[in-house]
Image (tube, rainbow, N blue to C red):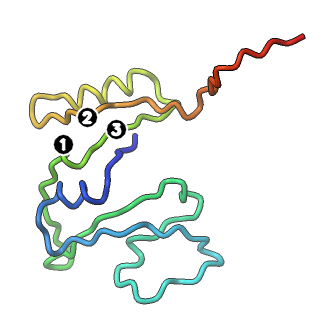
Amino acid sequence: IAIESTVGQLRESLGDRTDLIIDRVRYMDFEQDPIEKGHRHYRLFVKRKSFEHEKEIRATILLPKEGEGVALHCDLDILITSVHVSPTADAFVRDAIEVLCTRKHNPVNKPVLQSRMYRVADYGIDIKAN
């Protein structure tokens, strides 16, 4: 599944945090591309070039002590615009995600969409073979 959102929604959903770093992912050929200088948290925002179509952003926070985690509240109803399910997933997967989104405790009232990426395009043209 993929969650559709915006940087603004991500920032708002996590509240007013001064330790939050949001940046775009850099997609690289690890064998040839140069390492970017001056980016303090570079390795957190790097991914293989083959994933470039994702146009991903990431958020991280600076931990108060090394090795200790931090619980964050995230308002999913603010964060999520829509949820996209793989075009190859069975219908029950989409249904299960929809049930999760509509549960009684903290429902996420956003559309759950099955991707139409692999469907044959309908251009509205009726082509008849001779």
User: What is the x, y in percent for residue 38?
Assistant: 41, 89
Residue type pointed to by label 2: Lys
Determine contact: label 3, label 1, CB under 8 Å: no
Dot 3: element: strand
The answer to which of marks 1 and 2 sits earlier in the sequence is: 1
Residues at discs 1 and 2 in contact (Cβ within 8 Å): yes
Between the C-alphas of marks 2 and 3, the distance is 7 Å
Within 10 Å of disc 3 (Cα), the crowding (few <14, some 14-19, many 20+) is many
Q: In which quarter of the image is the C terminus?
A: top right
Residue at mark 2: 110
| Residue 29 falls in image quadrant | bottom right
In the image, what residue occupies the spot 17% across and 54% down? 13
Label 3 vs label 1: CA separation?
11 Å
- Classed neighbour count for the residue bearing mark 1: other residues with Cα under 10 Å, few (<14), some (14–19), many (≥20): some
- Image spot of residue 18 (x, y percent): 14, 74
Is 72 displayed left or right of 97 in the figure? left
Q: Is residue 106 left or right of residue 129?
A: left
- Marks 2,3: beta carbons within 8 A: yes
Judge by depth and name the residue closer to the eye, 95 or 130.
Answer: 130
Which quarter of the picture shows residue 123? Answer: top right
Image coordinates for residue 46, horizontal then vertical, percent: 46, 70
Q: How far apart are marks 1 and 2 (CA)?
A: 7 Å
Q: Which of marks 3 and 1 is nearer the N terminus?
A: 1
As helix, strand or loop, the secondary structure at mark 2 comes to loop
Residue bearing mark 1: 77
Secondary structure of residue under mark 1: helix
Does residue 110 sit above or below 34 in this rendering? above
Q: Which residue is drawn at 42% across and 58% down?
A: 56
Q: What residue is shown at x 16% (from left), y 53% (from top)?
A: 74
Say few, some or many: other residues with alpha carbon within 10 Å of mark 2 (under 14 / 14 to 19 / 20 or more): some
Q: The N terminus is located in which quarter?
A: top left
